[in-house]
Amino acid sequence: MRGLGRISQGWRVFVSTYESAIDAKGRVSIPASFRAALGGGNRIFLWPALDGSGCLEGGGEALMAMYRATLTRLAPQSPARKALVTRIIAGSADLKMDDTGRIKLTDELMQAADLEGRVKFAGNMDSFQIWNPERHAAHFDAMAAEAAKEDTLEALGQAYNEVLRQQVGGAPGLTIIDGGEG
């Protein structure tokens, strides 16, 4: 488990789902547990999700560093690299969190995810998502149905058992931060 141990040491996970309001100026508070998972950073990068689900996806500087390392492994002129760099790197907004934990969403991001009034923040392990609450409810129901499928449960069991076999001493080294309501 050398690779996972090295990556997971100090790794902070975005977990849970929170609802929040967008104020008249387009500001929204990042949940407290998500701020903790950012490890003290105040930069948030957000872009429309690649899968077409209609949410925003993002995270902090650690996530962008991971994407940079990943994308630079692709051939510089490959269509895949060009598309992903355009959508993730060029398509992201670099937002600064204020002292109270708020960011100001751009009009483009709000339009892309159909956000107004209220939003749902959803943890996505190393990233998080921002959803229109109605879209999130539909997505959550679809994912619940997918998670209940036999092949999904079998894939989870295989991956889980593989991690257990690779761990030394049974300590995964993951830090899960969930401070409750944010």
Image (cartoon, grey):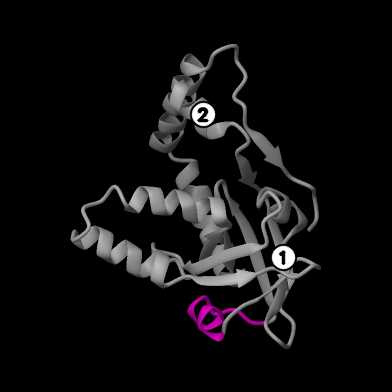
Q: Is residue 112 magenta?
A: yes
Point out residue 13 in the picture as x, y percentages from the top left corner: 62, 44
Badge 2 marks a residue whose secondary structure is helix
Q: Is residue 160 positioned above or below 152 on the image?
A: above
Look at discs 2 and 1 and give the one toward the viewer. Answer: 2
In the picture, residue 178 is in which quadrant? top right
Q: Amino acid at mark 2?
A: Arg
The residue that disc 2 covers is 6
Left or right? Give the position of 21 relative to 139: right
The extreme top residue here reads: 169
Q: Is residue 141 positioned above or below 53 on the image?
A: above
Q: Amino acid at mark 1?
A: Glu
What segment carries the magenta color? Answer: 107-116
Point out residue 37 in the picture as x, y percentages from the top left corner: 67, 49
The residue that disc 1 covers is 19
In terms of secondary structure, what is the magenta stretch mainly? helix
